[in-house]
Image: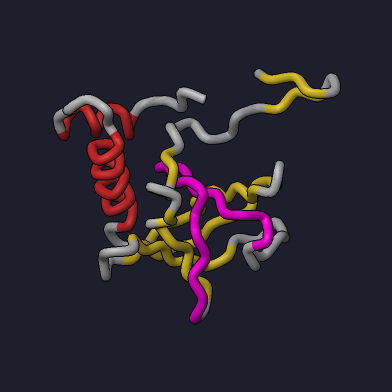
């Protein structure tokens, strides 16, 4: 637990977050209508975007699609805004269509392998993705 101004703040995601930017360029996108917006990070629990991204700020879930830059694959579902802190809006997955959960898991495993400073196996990357938040 982190305390700021005597108010407890709790980490809501139970899984590790992974940056959605590599070499200063976004590579995972939130698709809303005909527009795409860069993600800050992605986890098995949800994602975050810059606070100026035009997503609903009500408690109601909204429809979303996610896409990797170099892939036609999309993950569709519903997400809900959880909070906006420091210019970042965090969203949790409410539901994910079809094989979307497996696809996010696959994307994150590849992200971990590509970002690793040391060579790791796919099984090691999968364990990191499945593991708890380290933040």
Residue at figure coordinates x 57%, y 54% from the top left: 49
Q: Quadrant of residue 128?
A: top left
Looking at the picture, how far across and down is residue 72, in whole percent? 27, 70
Is residue 79 positioned above or below 127 on the image? Answer: below
Residue at figure coordinates x 31%, y 43% from the top left: 108
Seen from the viewer's position, the closer of residues 133 and 76 is 133
Looking at the picture, how far across and down is residue 113, in whole percent? 23, 37
Scheme of colours in the image: secondary structure
Q: Is residue 61 left or right of residue 112?
A: right
Q: Residue furthest right?
A: 5
Residue at figure coordinates x 60%, y 47% from the top left: 90
Looking at the picture, how far across and down is residue 93, in whole percent? 49, 51
Looking at the picture, how far across and down is residue 97, in whole percent? 36, 62
Q: Is residue 93 left or right of residue 119?
A: right
Q: Quadrant of residue 28?
A: bottom left
Q: Quadrant of the N terminus?
A: top right
| The stretch drawn in magenta includes residue 90 | no
Q: Is residue 36 left or right of residue 6?
A: left
Seen from the viewer's position, the closer of residues 93 and 125 is 125
Q: Residue furthest bottom?
A: 34
Is residue 35 positioned above or below 14 on the image? Answer: below
Residue at figure coordinates x 43%, y 56% from the top left: 26
| The stretch drawn in magenta includes residue 43 | yes
The residues colored magenta run 34-52
- Looking at the rendered structure, the number of numbered marks drawn on it comes to 0
């Amino acid at each position: 637990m982190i305390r700021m101004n005597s108010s407890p703040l709790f980490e809501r995601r139970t899984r590790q977050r992974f940056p959605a930017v590599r070499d200063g360029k976004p590579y995972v996108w939130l698709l809303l209508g005909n527009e795409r917006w860069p993600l800050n990070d992605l986890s098995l629990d949800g994602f975050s975007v810059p606070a100026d991204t035009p997503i609903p700020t009500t408690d109601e879930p909204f429809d979303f699609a996610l896409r990797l830059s170099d892939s036609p694959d999309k993950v569709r579902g519903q997400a809900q805004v959880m909070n906006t802190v420091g210019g970042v809006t965090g969203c949790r997955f409410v539901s994910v269509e079809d094989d979307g959960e497996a696809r996010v898991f696959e994307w994150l495993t590849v992200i971990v392998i590509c970002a690793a400073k040391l060579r790791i196996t796919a099984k090691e990357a999968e364990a990191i993705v499945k593991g708890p938040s380290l933040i």
